[in-house]
Amino acid sequence: MMRLVKRGLMFGNLFEVSSPALVARYNRALKHLTGKTTSLTEFHIDISGCSPEICDEFDDPLYLNPNGCNRQFILLSTEQKRAPILNAWFSTSRGILRQFIEQNDAQLFALTTREAVAGEMVNSVYSVEDPAEILNIRQIEIEADTVDFHLAAGEDLTSKIDRFLAVEDAWWDDVLISDMIELAKRTGDITRNPVKLTNSKFTQDNFYTAHFDGLYIFRDNKKTTCISFGDQEKLANLPVDKLIDHTARKDIAKFLEQNDYVEPLSSAKHLDIAAVLKQKIDFIVIDTAADEGEDLTDLSRRDIRYLVRKYGKQLPQEYHGLNSLLRWATNNGNLPHIKADHPAYFYTLRSSHHKDKDLVNMLLAQLTPLDFRQLFICHKDVFYKAYRDWTDAKKEYVSRFLEEEYLVDKAGARLDLFGPEPGMEIDEPETDLNMGPWGAIPQD
């Protein structure tokens, strides 16, 4: 995994905490939330304040996310909004935190200039040992304040000021005046510089959770649907209208098509389909060659053609299906009809233009694991797990490709592959789900 770390493909874009003042603020917040402190003098944190180095120090990847539910967070700077999220068990966590920071940017900036802001993403469920509890998570409310309760003190002072102004003869209430003076010492002049956080409630409609080996929940439709990658027997009590196992390809395809969640690459607008297909095909060839023990160093287009000739009989059906589509795209054949039960089918799709675009592309990535680029972009959890089992040659090829071909222009690559984002621009979802500092977090 260190190859990925060194190339910026794992734990990238984290916020550095190295000054004694920031370390001290972090420790006060950490003590406030967990009762623990770190002995580290330098570390990095994600958007929620989770640090891979502290995960390693505590031997607890979930030190800010107990039970994978009701995630706690520590904000030292509003710049954390640019960081990914580590150890997330819900695909919505980073988006909710980022919205909260952006919508309260000025207030949080003012607060974090003097102290860390600590809080929790609260819902009514505190444990998800029963799969049915997953469906009870509908609204996330963010509770946040500084360690010395600056916001709470401000609200208390506001209430006392209102009382002072409304009550006749309040000038003679020495206790009230004394309380106001003491609170003002902590809050400053809230009449001129009021600090109050807003927009702290967020809905969680369609989402992915890493619990129970991976569930995609779609409940915005007429029928609540769950696509599962785990043991179906454990999900017998899940209160959904339809439960689909990831191996039921026809059922998944029907669900995606009926709800207009996907579009074929062959009909996608502003897509260089031939270029996209060639790379997907290359990735499949690389996978086969790696399994055969080939040296994948500095491969050229000619080298890949050689590998196709050498291992033609070993190439999987995914290759042959996409190759037939490539022939059509380069005007050398008819448009093939690739059915849902064909291994190449999900490789021929991408999410259509809707609010759950990232979620659907995440699902498609998990259904098309040989396309390592889409897997890395859309579902890093599964990418990292697959990476561990690859040959060293494939690890080197993939990490170098992603460093040289993807990281140099992430936004451009996403635009080329998936089209424009729906509505406002949203950064690449950094969903290092279930990942600790140097490896995977056990789910049991």
Image (cartoon, grey):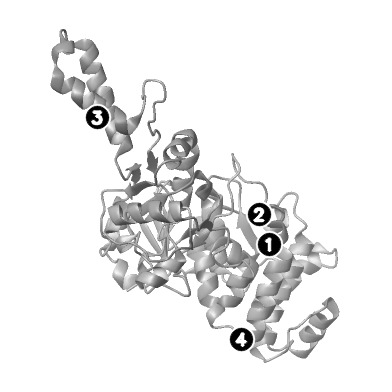
Mark before the other along the chain sequence, 3 or 2:
3
Q: Secondary structure at mark 2?
A: helix
Mark 3 vs mark 2: in front:
3
Mark 1 vs mark 4: in front:
1
Q: Distance from label 4 to label 2 (Cα)?
A: 29 Å
Mark 4 vs mark 2: in front:
4
Quadrant hosting residue 51? bottom left
Q: Distance from label 1 to label 2 (Cα)?
A: 16 Å
Badge 3: residue crowd in 10 Å (few <14, some 14–19, many ≥20):
few
In the image, 392: left or right of 234? right
Mark 1 vs mark 3: in front:
3
User: Residue tagged by mark 4?
Assistant: 391
Q: Nearer the viewer, residue 277 or 243?
A: 277
Q: Distance from label 3 to label 2 (Cα)?
A: 56 Å
Q: Secondary structure at mark 3?
A: helix
Residue 155 visible in the picture: no
Q: Distance from label 1 to label 4 (Cα)?
A: 22 Å
Q: Secondary structure at mark 4?
A: loop
Residue 177: percent from the left, percent from the top?
20, 20
Looking at the image, is 75 positioned above or below residue 186? below
Q: Which mark is residue 407?
A: 1
Q: Kindly check if marks 1 and 2 are in contact, taking CB atoms under 8 A apart as contact.
A: no
In the image, 341: left or right of 129? right
The amino acid marked with disc number 4 is Thr
The amino acid marked with disc number 3 is Glu
The amino acid marked with disc number 1 is Leu
